[in-house]
Image (cartoon, rainbow, N blue to C red):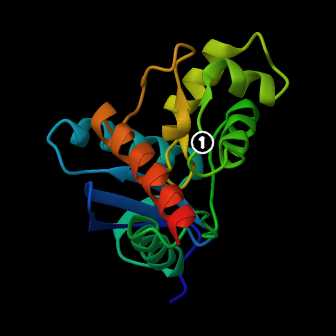
Amino acid sequence: MTTPPNILLTHRFDTPLGEMLACASPSGLCLLEFADTPADTPRLQKELNALQRLLAATIAPGVNTHIQQAQQQLQDYFRGVRRNFSVALHMSGTAFQQRVWKGLLRIPYGQTLSYQEEAQAIHQPAAVRAVANANGANRMSIIIPCHRVIGKNGQLVGYGGGLARKQWLLQHEQRMLATDFKT
């Protein structure tokens, strides 16, 4: 199905960690967030409003190839048979935010970095706070793996989906890696 470029489609689906909302343009996925608690509603509405403004688009319910692919790839991730995502992404943000998000994509499955290490990895060692803010602006939960970034002291900090989900995702990846060594 061909969608006019000024339409963003949204679709909700269930995952083992709760309902998620996917939003995609004809170019790619532009949002994937948890959407199963009342507290999610204002945050999601703010993100959808920002996407409408940034992309000069209207939001409508529906599904396109990018949403279907994201849903299938997430199912594979949760089953432990996918570690990397290939769905096209339509990332809307500043040049700095996009550099940070591309850096997140380079964090290997099952591994973590601190915000300071992430800032060093993008060659901006003094920009730790800005890196943390860019992580917080990431609109693609799991697919752009901001859950793999932890505090300098090893503590779990800062995850829009909640720290319990962050911990679950990190433990899931560790379990899948451990399974590899047993087979």
Q: Farthest residue toward the front?
A: 182
Specify whether residue 25 is in view: yes
Identify the residue at image location x=14%, y=41%.
38
Query: x, y (%) of residue 84?
Result: 62, 63
Identify the residue at image location x=28%, y=68%.
13
List the residue tagged with mark 1.
Answer: 111
Q: Secondary structure at mark 1?
A: loop
Q: Farthest residue toward the top?
A: 126
Q: Nearer the viewer, residue 108 or 25?
A: 108
Numbered label tally: 1
Identify the residue at image location x=53%, y=55%.
143
Quadrant of res 23: bottom left
Query: x, y (%) of residue 16?
Result: 26, 61
Q: Would residue 111 be found to the left or right of residue 58 on screen? A: right
Q: Farthest residue toward the left?
A: 38
Specify whether residue 57 is in view: no
Q: Would residue 127 be found to the left or right of residue 79 on screen? A: right
Q: Farthest residue toward the right?
A: 123
Query: x, y (%) of residue 91?
Result: 63, 51
